[in-house]
Amino acid sequence: MGMTLTEKILAKHAGRDRVRPGDFIVARVDLVLGNDITAPVAIAEFERIGATRVFDPDKIALVPDHFTPNKDIKSAEQVRIMREFAKKHGITHFFEIGEMGIEHCLLPEKGMVVPGDLVVGADSHTCTYGALGAFSTGVGSTDIAAAMATGELWFRVPETIRFVFRGSLKPWVGGKDLILYTIGKIGVDGARYKAMEFAGEAISSLSVEGRLTMANMAIEAGGKNGIFMPDQKTVEYLLERTDREYELLESDADAEYSEVYEFDASEIEPQVALPHLPENARPVSEVKGIQIDQVVIGSCTNGRIEDLREAAAILRNKKVARGVRCIIIPGTQSVYLQAVREGLVEVFVEAGAVVSTPTCGPCLGGHMGVLAAGERAVSTTNRNFVGRMGHPKSEVYLAGPAVAAASAVAGEIVGPEEVV
């Protein structure tokens, strides 16, 4: 019996010829990630265990993105802890204000992950990097402390579920719609501690940006990781970002899967996940007409240049509805600059939207767009739990950039074809 892509990566990093689901292994890591919420905890644990140096200062990334620019004294202190730790240990990849971005947009953009890597991060959406053919997963801050000290971590090899999307995508349907549709079919615990492997001609047609969106939300189905077979699009994406060597691995034809789902992508329309779970996914045609107060376009799920271009295509020569707040958050400084150069920021401002510096901000109810009681938001973020974006009596509707932008114009949830 062959191995899945996830199993091959874990076997290689554990120094084994093969692994099977359920095996416990100790594996070396290629990259360790922490942010301004989780890294200070990991740093405290690192020092508590008596570690005196990190295993490799080039293989640790510290990204202050959740409450940056610092919104208050406490958030400023969190970043100070990271900054001093990075200086003390000579950590190469500490991203200061002006360099930083939303971590899961920033690291792929910087070419810091390549196919076959093993990446761990103290953030649940570390699963994003599976879009590049890497095994990446979120772990606790104490695990990050151990990984920073030793360069290794233990894992239980997950079973793999294969999701095959046949056919062609409808207009305005992208990675966000495919992953919301998937979660709607299997539920928020449908892939608990399993690898989610995506394949099929509709997946092959997706850009790397669309794949990053899908892998990002594997955790919303309970997945240990999401993963895509690296292909020519992956190679082209990495060509201008890194000169690291890597191998294009893929699952064996006789690999064993715990389940296989097959979907006809041509039947999937833009999706909206209703409060208060990502599994409450519905076609936009079934939920249109719900009045809204705010739209957020950005986050580690949909803050890339492709997402902003899609939103701008909807908002160009239009106005955000009176009484609706529209907040655009580029994922990185590079995305922000590209949006300026392409005239997208001008489109957004003329439409009546505001454009923020890169930050997680409203996604976790932190700042830059917190909701009051009774308010509703359409958001391109990844979670819509009770109180996720502010008051416990607010509501968050998850969607892709096209539906979000169209809803901002209409003042209610609508599909993009209704305003274009």
Image (spheres, grey):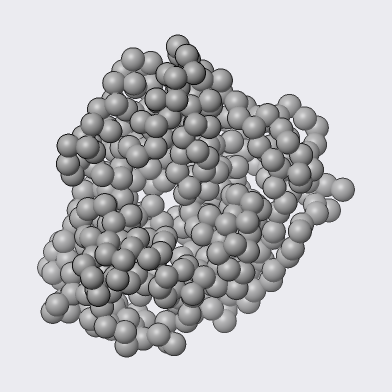
Q: Quadrant of residue 309?
A: bottom left
Q: Residue at x 76, y 39 (%)?
A: 23
In screen coordinates, is 68 left or right of 322? right
Please state if 354 lies on the left or on the right of 191 as rendered. Answer: left
Residue 22 placement (x, y as % from top left) = 76, 44
Residue 226 appears in the picture as rendered: yes
Quarter where residue 160 is shown: bottom right
Of residues 4 and 295, which is closer to you in this image? 295
**Quadrant in which the C terminus appears:** bottom left
Q: Nearer the viewer, residue 154 or 328?
A: 154
Q: How many marks?
A: 0
Residue at 63% across / 77% down in the picture?
264
- Between 377 and 343, the residue placed more toward the observer is 377
Q: Is residue 229 left or right of residue 220?
A: right
344 is higher (above) or lower (below) than 1 = below
* Identity of the residue furthest to the top in this view: 52
| Percent position of residue 101, x then y | 31, 43
Measured from the top left, where is residue 145 in percent x and y? 48, 27
Task: Relative to 84, say whether 395 is above or below.
Answer: below
Horizontal and vertical percent position of residue 33? 45, 34
- The residue at 63%/64% (across/down) is 190
Q: Is residue 319 above or below residue 144?
A: below
Examine the rendered structure and indicate whether residue 16 appears above or below residue 297.
Answer: above
Residue 310 appears in the figure: no
